[in-house]
Amino acid sequence: MIHARNTDRLLIISTLILVVVGVVMVYSTSYVVATKRFGSEYFFVKKQLIFAAAGIMLFIVSAKIPYRLYRHLAYPILIFAILLLLLIFVPTLSHEAGGARRWIKIMGFTFQPSEFAKFAVIIFLAYSLEAKQSVIKDFYAGFLPNIIIPGVVIALIMSEPDFGTAVTLTILVYVMNFAGGVKFRYLGGLTLAVLPVLYLVVTNFGYMMNRITVFLDPWKDPSGAGFQMVQSFLAFGSGGLSGVGLGEGKQKLFFLPEAHTDFIFSIIGEEMGLIGAGITIALYLAFFISGTRIAMRAKDLFGTYLALGLTLMISLQALVNMAVVMGVVPPKGLTLPFISYGGTSLLVSLFAVGIILNVCIEGNEH
Amino acid sequence: MKNERDALKIRIIFVSVIFVLFYGVIFSRAFQLQIIEGESLEEKAGRQHVRTHTVPSKRGAILDRNLNELAVSLEVDSIFAHPREMEDNSIDKVSVAKILSEVLPVKKSILSKSLSSKKGFVWLKRQLDLGAEDRTTLSGLKGIGMVKEGRRFYPSDSLAANLMGFTGIDSNGLEGIELHFDEDLKGTPIVMKADKDAKGNLLLFEDLEESVQGMDLVLTIDKNIQYIAEKALKDAVDKFEAVAGTVIVMEPKSGEILAMATLPTFNPNEFSEHSPYEWRNRAVTDSFEPGSTMKAFLLASVLEDGLFDTDDILYCENGKYDVYDRTFHDTKEHGWLSVGNIIKNSSNIGAIKMSEKLGRRRFHSYLKDFGFGYKTGIGLPGESKGVMAQGKKWSEIKRNTISFGQGISVTSIQLVTAISAIANGGYLMEPRIVKELRTSSGIVASKYNPLVRRRVISEETSKEVTEVLKSVVAPGGTGVRASEGLGFAVAGKTGTAQKVDPEKGGYSKDNFLVSFLGFAPADDPRLAIFVMLDEPKTGVAGGIAAAPVFREIVKETLPYLGVFPEGLPSEEVLGEATPRFVKRDTVDGSRSVKKADSGTVDATSTDTVPDFTGKTMRSALLLARVRSMDIDIEGSGRAVSQSLVAGSKIGDGNVTVVFH
C-alpha cells in the first residue's frame, strides 16, 4: 500500500487534477469533431477516460516497483528502445501520419517508440551518471558516453522525423548531464560545435524553415501557413480573463485543427480564460517543484537522476507545448502531458509519475 | 561526499530556477494574449465565427381604398442544397438528383449540375407550392433544405399593373409603387445569427433579432373605379386603334387618385414576359404637348387677372391670323367670338388674342401655379416634370403657341391635378396615391392627408371657368360627346395635338394625341378625369375619341359613389346609399345586398327583373336598387347569367347573378 505519510501529496494531487482537466477538456474540444466524424460526441472522451483509468492503475503499479530494478535493466531497456526505433524503418510495421513515421503497428496496436526511448535514455543516464560519478569530470569517461549514447537515440528520433521529441530529449540530456556534474565547459563547447550543424539542418529541411518564418510572423499569412498560430492567438484573445465558458469555445469548430491534441491549451485559454490557463500553468509548476524536491531527497544518486529526468521530461514537454501554442517558440508537434488526447502519452506519463513516486517512497523510508 | 551532495543540490536548484522562470514567461505570454491584446483578438475571432443570415420578412400587401387586395405575399417553398456538405458526407448525388427531379419541376441534368457545384449553398428551385407528400420526400434528403419565402402575387393580374409595378424574386420592389414604397412594404429583415465553422458551414442558430413585418399600403385607388377606367380606356384604344392611352381619375377636393389606367399594360405576375415599354406608367413618366386642353388654364388666368369677362368679344380674324412671320389658323373660320365661345369652339386665334393681353410673364406664372413644369409630388418613380421654359425667355411666338397647348410639354398627372384646382374652387392639391400605411396587425401607422399646395384662382373664377367648360360639352361644343345621354352636368375641355414628327422635325400631319380633361358633376365635382389616346388611327379629335371615355367613366362611377343622375333616386332618398352597401358574406364568399331602405321606385324602373347580362357588378347593383330588389352576387367581372330571366316579375326571393 502507498502510505500517505511516505508520499508526496502535491505530486499526486497535481497529477490527478491535470488528468481530470484533460478528460474534461478532451470532451469540450472534441465533441463537435467527434459528432461530425464518428456520429458520437463521446467518441474521443470515452477513449480518454478508458486510458485515464488504465493509466492510473499503471501509476499505482509503477509506484510499487522498486526503482532500483531499472538500474539493473538500463542496458537491456536501451537496446530494446533502439531496436524499436529501428523497427520504424521496416515498412510493413511502420505507420505513417502527416509525412512522418513515428508509430509502429503490432497486432493492431499502434505504439510510439520515441515515447519509450525517452524512458530508456533517462534510465540510462541515471544509471550512467551514478556509475561514473567518480570520473564524471573526465572528458572521455564522464562526458562522451553520456552524450554519445543518448545522441544515437536522438539521431534516430530525428530521422523519423520527430523534431519536437528530439529537441526536448536533447535539452533533457543536457540538463541531466549538467545536474550530474559533467563539466559545463564540455557541454557549452558541444553546443557551440553543434550550432552550425543545426543551422544547416534547419535551413535544408523546408518544413522547418517554414515553421520558423511562420513563428516569426504568423499574421503575414493568417489564412495559409500562419492559420494555426493565428487561430490559437484568437482563441486566447477570445478567452480574456475568465473565458467564454466551458464548452462554449468557437475555435474548436474546425478553426483549430486537432484542438483536442496539440492545441488543447489554446481552448483552455479560450473557454477558461487567463484564470484557467494560469491554474493549469500553476499545476504543472506544482508538479515540477514536487518532482525536483523528490529528486533531491532520493536515497541514492540513481533515484535523484531518475526522478529528476522523469520530472523534466514531463515538465519540458508541457512548457514547450504551451510555448508553441502561444507563439513563444516555433511549432514542435508536441502534446500537452496528462491533458491532450492520446493513449500512449497518458500511459507513459502516468507510469513515469509512478516511478517518481516510488523514488519518493523509498527515499522517505530510508 | 557531503560537498558533492550539496553541489548536486545547487545544480538542481539552478535548473529549477530556470524552469520556474520559463513558467513565468509562459504565464506572462498568456497575460499578454488574453488581457493586453485580448480585445482586438476577440474582435477578430468574432468576425470569423458569427455570420448573419438575413431572411426578408413578409412583404406588406397593397390594398385599394376599400381594403381589397391588389398585391399580396404568399408563403411558398424554396428548395436549396448544401453541395459541399453532401461531398463531405459522401452522399450519392446522382440518386438525390433523381429523387429531386421527380418532385421539382427542374430537369435532372440541371439538378445534377447544381449539386456538383463546389459551393456551400445553391438554390435548386425557388418559390413553388409543394404538396405535403413532396415536402416529406424532400425533408428526408440529406443536404437538401427548404425555406418559406414570400412570393408576390397580384390577384387581379393586370389591374393597375403600371401603377403598382412588381417585385423581383427576392421580393424587392423593382417598379411602380412596389419600388417607391419598397422600404415600407419590406419591413426589416429577419436577422439570424449563426456560428460558422472553418469550413463555412452554419452550425447553431443563435438568436432571432426583432424584425418588423412589412407595412400594408392602402392606396387611394378604388378597385372598381380602376376597373371601369381600364375598361373604358381599352374599348377606346381598340376602337380608335391608338398605340397607347392613359386615364386618371382624381377626387378633386382631396387630390386622391381613384384610378390610374394606362395602355399598353402587362401582367405583373409574369412581368418578365413583358417589355419595359409595357411596364411604364405613362401617366407620370410621359410628357407631351397637350393641345387645346391648355386653353382652360389660359381662361382661368385671364379671368383671375380680370382682363376679360366671359362675355367680352374678340375678333378671330376669320380663321387666319398673321403674327410676325407666322400665320395661325383655326379649323373653323370665326369672326367675333365671346371669350366663352372661344373656349367652346376651341379657337386658336381667340386664345392667342387672350394671351396677348395676359402677357408671357403672367401666363407663365399662372401655368407654374397650376403645377406645370414641376413634379407634382405624387411619389411614383420616374415622374417627369414636363418641359416649360421660364416666362421671360418665351418668345412672342411661344406665348402664342402655348395658349393653345404647343411648345409646352406636360404630364397626365399634371393636367388632372390642374383641372382639379379649377373644379375644387381654386386649390392646387398634391396628388395622393397612398392613403395610409398599416402595420401587419391592421393598425394605421401613418396617414397621408390631403395637402393643398397653393391657391391658384378664386372661387369666383373657378365658377366662371366651370360655366364655360360646361358649354364645351353642351350641344355645339367640341366636347359634346362627353355628356351625351349622361344625365349629369359635366364640364371639360377637348384637346387635339399634332405630334412632333421625330424624323422630319416640325409637326406631323398624321400623328395626333387626343385628349379630354374634365370633371363631374360640374357643380359639385366628385371626379376629375383626364383621358388621353396616343396616335389614334380614326376619330382623330379629342371630342370624338377621348370624350366618350370620359362619359363612360362618369356614367359608371358616379352612381357607384352614390351620385345619381337627375330623375333617379338620389342619395337622400335611398338613405344609406354609399359604396359600402355591399357586404361580404364570409361563409360562402358570395355577396348579398341589403334591401334598400326605401321603397321608392322611380319612373324609369319597372316591377320586372331587368337583364343583368353584360353589366358590371356596380351597374347590376344599381339596376337592382332602383327596383328595390335584392340580388345575390357570385363571382366578379361582368354578369353572365341570372337565376330569374329578364322580364319576369320581381318576387320575394333573391335573384342570383353570376359574374365572370
Image (spheres, coloured by chain):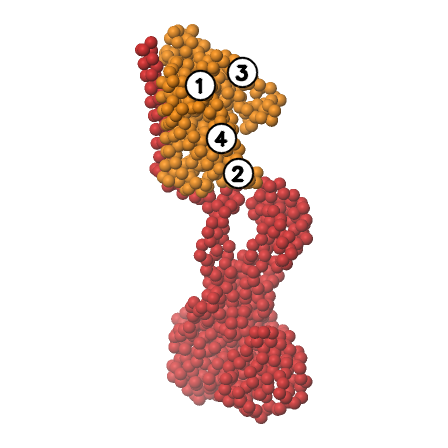
Chain colours: A orange, B red
**Residue at 60% from the left image edge and 60% from the top image edge:** B272
Is B195 placed left or right of B657 in the picture?
A: left
Q: Which residue is label 4 attached to?
A: A52
Amino acid type shown at disc 1: Thr
Q: Which residue is label 3 attached to?
A: A80
Amino acid type shown at disc 3: Phe
Q: Are marks 1 and 3 in contact (CB under 8 Å)?
A: no
Q: Viewer-nearest of labels 3 and 4?
A: 4
Location of residue B10 in the rendering, given as x and y in whole percent from the top left corner: 32, 16
- Say few, some or many: other residues with alpha carbon within 10 Å of mark 2 (under 14 / 14 to 19 / 20 or more): some
Location of residue B305 in the rendering, given as x and y in whole percent from the top left corner: 38, 81
Quadrant of image for the C terminus of chain B: bottom right
Q: Which residue is label 1 attached to?
A: A170
Marks 3/2: CA–CA distance: 36 Å
Answer yes or no: is residue B104 visible.
no
Question: Looking at the rendering, which quadrant does residue B374 occupy?
Answer: bottom left
Question: SS of the residue at dot 4?
Answer: helix
**Same chain assignment for discs 3 and 2:** yes
Answer yes or no: is residue A140 visible.
yes
- Say few, some or many: other residues with alpha carbon within 10 Å of mark 4 (under 14 / 14 to 19 / 20 or more): many
Q: Are marks 1 and 2 in contact (CB under 8 Å)?
A: no
